[in-house]
Amino acid sequence: MVVCAHNEQEYIDDCLKSILSQTLKPRSIIVILDRCTDKTEEIVRSILPQSALIVRKDAQAWRNSISENLEIGRSKATGQALAVVDSDMIIPVNFLEQLLPQLKEYSSVSARARTDPSQGFLNKLVSSWERTYRLAPSGGQPRGGARVISMSDLNEIGGFHDVIAWDTDLDIRFRRSGHRVRLDPFLTVLHRRRMTLRRSASYQIQMGRARRELGVSFSRTLLHSMFRIRPFVVYGYIRGKGALRTKNP
């Protein structure tokens, strides 16, 4: 299981405790500490057993740091499956028990992420808005860092690439290689990060840049922005003009 963290002292405690509480214990836990300057490393070392692998990354080599962190985690991982959990998420106790068996049919299986409404008024709004995913044409697509991945299939497609939206890129490459991916609608993880207007706008801009990088058309992006009420996605898409996808070193 891989957890990537950059200054996550506010959330990493609950994330790791939810991992340690799994009914099916992970074979190993790998934490990538990405240039942390707060108490994240101290908290991680106080919670995890000595058998856990803690990797400190002091410099960024790839354009997209989270993709680089995941590739570092893949290079250190052993076993037949790789579980990825974002450091600001809490996973249910049956996360591994429910998702891992599905790798017999799928290359990657994701849980559904729900914004924690207890983290403020904006979180409550976002949590309510997320219900509209049921109406969105692509609402059933896997998203984000709460998934298990077949290691053999991941190695087959060349691991993680240096892109903004590593999750979407991964699913696209799996499908192109003839593999299947799935979102498990019956398993929900809690995304605890406190939302702000600035963070929301920044996320939308990144999403727009990612859509351009992945080759999504402007018309589809515009419709997505209008339907999902995400005006900054179009701005990010336009800003991403001319950006070239960086290949893995």
Image: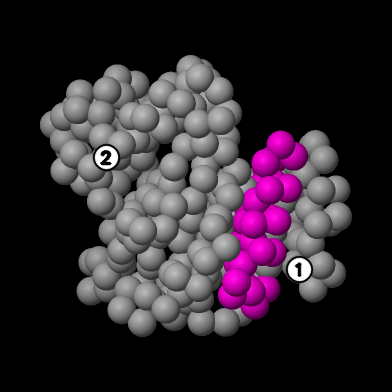
**Vertical comparison of 235 with 36: above or below:** above
Residue at 74% of width from left, 60% of height from top? 55
Mark 2 neighbour density, 10 Å: few (under 14) some (14–19) many (20 or more): few
Indicate the amino acid at tag 1: Ala
Residue at 57% of width from left, 63% of height from top? 93
| Helix, strand or loop for disc 2 | helix
Q: Which is nearer the N-term, disc 2 or disc 1?
A: 1
Task: State how the image is colored.
Answer: one colour
> Is-magenta flag for residue 123?
no
- The residue pinned by badge 1 equals 52
The magenta-colored residue range is 1-28
**Residue 177 placement (x, y as % from top left):** 26, 72
Q: Nearer the viewer, residue 10 or 23?
A: 23
Q: Nearer the viewer, residue 131 or 47?
A: 131
Can residue 234 be seen from the camera position used here? Answer: no
Does residue 31 appear left or right of residue 100 in this picture? Answer: right
- The residue pinned by badge 2 equals 133
Mark 1 neighbour density, 10 Å: few (under 14) some (14–19) many (20 or more): some
In the picture, which quadrant includes the N terminus?
bottom right
**Residue 150 placement (x, y as % from top left):** 43, 75
Question: CA gap, disc 2 to disc 1?
Answer: 36 Å
**Residue 242 placement (x, y as % from top left):** 32, 33
Quarter holding residue 133 = top left
**Vertical comparison of 243 with 58: above or below:** above
**Residue 181 placement (x, y as % from top left):** 30, 66
| Helix, strand or loop for disc 1 | loop
